[in-house]
Image (cartoon, grey):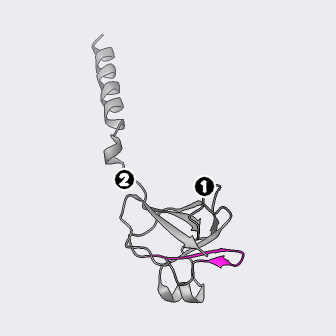
Amino acid sequence: MKKFNTILILFCVIILTSFTSAENQPLPTSLRITILNELGNIEAGVKVTLYKTDEDYKSEENPVSESQLTDKKGRVTFKNLAPIVYFVNAEKGDKNNYGAGVQTDTIQEGRINKVSIIIE
């Protein structure tokens, strides 16, 4: 009986220490971009590319990751990012965001940061 109690206590300690609250689990730093057209409507199928520097953005070199296409809600999400400023290139046909809304604010670590970009 003593051995059983020891095993039971050990089992309970293992179970209790294996659970952590959601507050203790950091979220990956992400950037969710919603693309809208000049009328404010959601745009699906927009190619979105993210860059770390203005120079990379202008030369369209060294993207942060592969380009993504917006879903039916007009959104793409880039994950596991550093908390810095990013430059966004969004294109669909002859519409793009050149000259407007290409730079984010410094994104916050451990959050899903959200921005909207207009293409025209």
Which quadrant: the C terminus? Answer: bottom right
Residue drawn at the location 32% of the way across and 31% of the way down: 16
Using residue 94 as the reference point, say whether residue 99 is left or right of it. Answer: left
Disc assigned to residue 73: 1
Using residue 11 as the reference point, say whether residue 78 is left or right of it. Answer: right
Q: Dot 1, crowdedness within 10 Å: few (<14), some or many (≥20)?
A: some
Q: Position of residue 84 (x, y in %)?
A: 39, 74
Q: Dot 2, crowdedness within 10 Å: few (<14), some or many (≥20)?
A: few
Distance between the alpha carbons at the discs numbered 2 and 1: 26 Å
Front residue of 86/14: it is: 86
Residue drawn at the location 36% of the way across and 30% of the way down: 15
Instruction: Examine the rendered structure and indicate whether residue 17 appears above or below residue 89.
Output: above
Q: Position of residue 101 (x, y in %)?
A: 49, 77
Instruction: Examine the rendered structure and indicate whether residue 76 appears above or below residue 2.
Output: below
Front residue of 105/110: it is: 105
* Residue 105, picture quadrant: bottom left
Q: Name the outermost residue toward the front.
A: 39
Q: Position of residue 90 (x, y in %)?
A: 60, 74
Using residue 12 as the reference point, say whether residue 48 is left or right of it. Answer: right
Q: Main secondary structure of the magenta part?
A: strand
Q: Amino acid at mark 2?
A: Pro
Q: Name the outermost residue toward the top.
A: 1
Disc assigned to residue 26: 2
The label nearer to you, 2 versus 1, is 1
Q: Is residue 7 magenta?
A: no
Q: Is residue 95 magenta?
A: yes
Q: Amino acid at mark 1?
A: Lys
Q: Mark 2 vs mark 1: which is more N-terminal?
A: 2
Residue drawn at the location 40% of the way across and 54% of the way down: 27
- Magenta stretch? 86-96
Local secondary structure at mark 2: loop
